[in-house]
Image (cartoon, grey):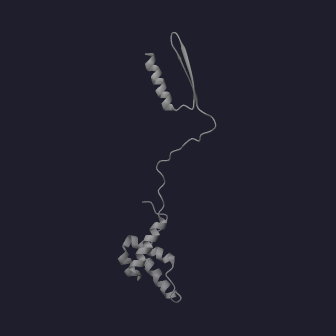
Amino acid sequence: MPRSKKASVSLEEVKARFEEWRRNRKGKAPIPDELWAAAAEVARREGVSRTSAELHVEWNHLKRRMAARSRTSAKPAPPRFVELMAPRGESRPECVIEVQGRHAKLRIHLKDASASYLATLSRELRESAS
């Protein structure tokens, strides 16, 4: 089974990090973003209620952090279909159609004719000749 790029942390590891931060924090310092990120990661696996109880953080704060984290980390999916359009240059497509019958010869010179127009024209010429 392939390993993920980022190793997931356990609830016990995050709990130990929170306890260490609480022991060493100065005054009423807010919980650092790194700890909130770790708590949100654990809560996705273990559930918000269990994680908030184990880490002694408010359920609503953890839930909001999870939602904010998922919005910022979500990457848009790569496109499955990409249409490539050729740039129009100065040159114009040209077409010469020559039709020769028993008694006559017809030559048609077209500029900027679409493929659908040429198909229609050739079908009509063929039908009129038969």
Q: Position of residue 31 (x, y in %)?
A: 49, 81
Depicted 80 relative to depicted 93: above or below: below
The quadrant of the rendering that contains the N terminus is bottom left
**Residue most extreme to the bottom:** 27
Residue found 47% across the figure and 56% down from its top: 77
Q: Position of residue 25 (x, y in %)?
A: 52, 86
**Residue most extreme to the right:** 90
Horizontally, residue 111 falls left or right of residue 1, namely right
Residue found 52% across the figure and 32% down from its top: 114
Quarter of the image for residue 109 reads top right
Towards the viewer: 16 or 61: 61
- Determine if residue 106 is in view: yes
Residue found 46% across the figure and 71% down from its top: 68
- Determine if residue 6 is in view: no
The quadrant of the rendering that contains the C terminus is top left
The number of discs equals 0
Horizontally, residue 23 falls left or right of residue 51, namely right
Q: Position of residue 16 (x, y in %)?
A: 45, 81
Towards the viewer: 41 or 20: 41
Q: Position of residue 82 (x, y in %)?
A: 50, 47
Depicted 76 relative to depicted 21: above or below: above
Residue found 52% across the figure and 90% down from its top: 27
Towards the viewer: 47 or 91: 91
**Residue most extreme to the top:** 103
